[in-house]
Amino acid sequence: MGYTELTKAPCNQTLEVITVNGDAGWEKRFEAMGIRKGRRIRKIATQPFGGPVVIEVNSSKISLGRNIAAKIEVEVLASPSA
């Protein structure tokens, strides 16, 4: 499977962060949250009506606004049944 924005990635699957788009300020914020190139994360949910995207990074749950989550490009690695 190719790369996709975090907002469009399927829920409950292992994802690998491919790129983090944005200026240096955003890169530092993502780094502080543990979101960096090569990191494996899991998308838990996308809340309805334009709500946030909830992800799991290092056993911590993080809510990201959709505009922020759109800056993160991921690759789907595995489904829960794999």
Image (cartoon, rainbow, N blue to C red):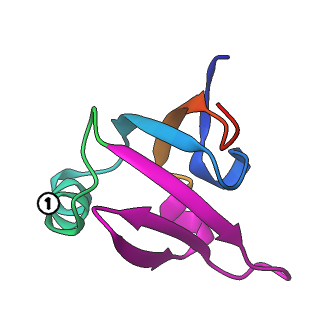
- Magenta-drawn stretch contains 64: yes
Q: In what quadrant of the picture does the N terminus appear?
A: top right
Q: Quadrant of residue 35?
A: bottom left
Q: In what quadrant of the picture does the C terminus appear?
A: top right
- Please indicate whether residue 67 sits to the left or right of residue 20 in the image: right
Q: Which residues are magenta?
A: 40-69
Position of 24 relative to 67 (above/below):
above
| Residue lying furthest front | 81
Taking the spot 29% from the left edge, 41% from the top edge, the residue there is 39
Q: Nearer the viewer, residue 13 or 17?
A: 13
- Please indicate whether residue 80 sits to the left or right of residue 21 in the image: right
Q: Which residue is mark 1?
A: 28
Q: In the rendering, at what x and y percent does residue 72 appear?
A: 46, 47
Q: In the rendering, at what x and y percent does residue 58 appear?
A: 27, 62
Q: At label 1, which amino acid type do we have? A: Lys
Position of 75 relative to 73 (above/below):
above
Q: Quadrant of residue 30?
A: bottom left
| Residue lying furthest top | 1
Q: In the rendering, at what x and y percent does residue 32 appear?
A: 14, 67
Taking the spot 62% from the left edge, 78% from the top edge, the residue there is 52
Q: In the rendering, at what x and y percent does residue 42 appear?
A: 51, 54
- Please indicate whether residue 31 sits to the left or right of residue 30 in the image: left
Taking the spot 42% from the left edge, 77% from the top edge, the residue there is 61
User: Secondary structure beneath disc 1?
Assistant: helix
Q: Nearer the viewer, residue 26 or 48?
A: 48
- Magenta-drawn stretch contains 28: no
Q: Nearer the viewer, residue 73 or 42?
A: 42
Q: How many discs mark residues in the rendered view? A: 1
- Please indicate whether residue 69 sits to the left or right of residue 23 in the image: right
